[in-house]
Each structure stands twice: as C-alpha cells, then as structure tokens.
Amino acid sequence: MILEAVLLQVKQGLEEEYEDAFRQASVIISSMKGYISHELQRCLEVNGKYLLLIKWETLEDHTVGFRQSNEYKEWKKLLHHFYDPFPIVEHFEKVRLS
C-alpha cells in the first residue's frame, strides 16, 4: 500500500467553493483502479490549508493509471485552479517496526 500525501494551499476566499469541487472530484478518484481510500483534512491554524491523503495499492496506480487517464483531466479541471502555490505530491510506504 502506498500513501500519497499532499499539502494544499487554496486561494483565499475560495475554501467553500473548493470543498464543494472536491466533493465532486472524490467520485472520480474513488472509481480508479488501485484506489483504496482518501481523506481531506482542513488545517485549524492556517486558512485555506488542507492535507490530502490518498491510499493506493501501488505507486503506478497513481502515477500511471490515474495521472495518465481521462479521469485525471476532469480532476485537474475541477481542482487545480484553486491552488497557489501548486502543491508537491509525495508518496510514502509504511516502515516495518518489528
């Protein structure tokens, strides 16, 4: 399992509109091959700051399957104009502790 983690900064005053658009975009992401789950967290200290966490079965499910799909074009159209600056996407895997 891979965890995609993204810190998002939404343009001031567009937070409510962004959250509505994200609800629509959630239908897109949840339909993709390899998708496990996702959540969007709103920062309490900084207005317009969000943390997006998406679990994928494999890295390629996100970087190839989703990012190269027609569904991604719709995702991008719904959400990307809200971000300033444009976010950095990072991927993580669980560390075995025993």
Image (tube, rainbow, N blue to C red):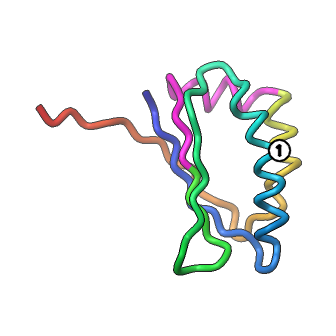
The residue sitting at 79% across, 61% down in the picture is 18
Where does the image place residue 13, in percent across and percent down from the top left? 81, 79
Frontmost residue, 93 versus 48:
48
Residue at image location 56% in from the left, 40% down from the top: 54
In the depicted view, which residue is nearer to us: 13 or 83? 13
Give x and y (percent) for residue 58.
Answer: 50, 24
Q: Residue at x 72, y 69 (%)?
A: 10
Q: Would you identify the image quadrant in which residue 86 lies? A: bottom right
Instruction: Give the answer, above or below, for where 47 lies relative to 55.
Output: below
Outermost residue, left direction?
Answer: 98
Q: Residue at x 55, y 70 (%)?
A: 43
Identify the image quadrant of residue 73.
top right
Q: Amino acid at mark 1?
A: Gln
* 20 lies left or right of 67: right
Give the extent of the magenta segment.
53-69
Q: Is residue 35 magenta?
A: no
Q: Nearer the viewer, residue 59 or 47?
A: 47
The residue that label 1 is drawn on is 24
Quadrant where the image shows the N terminus: top left
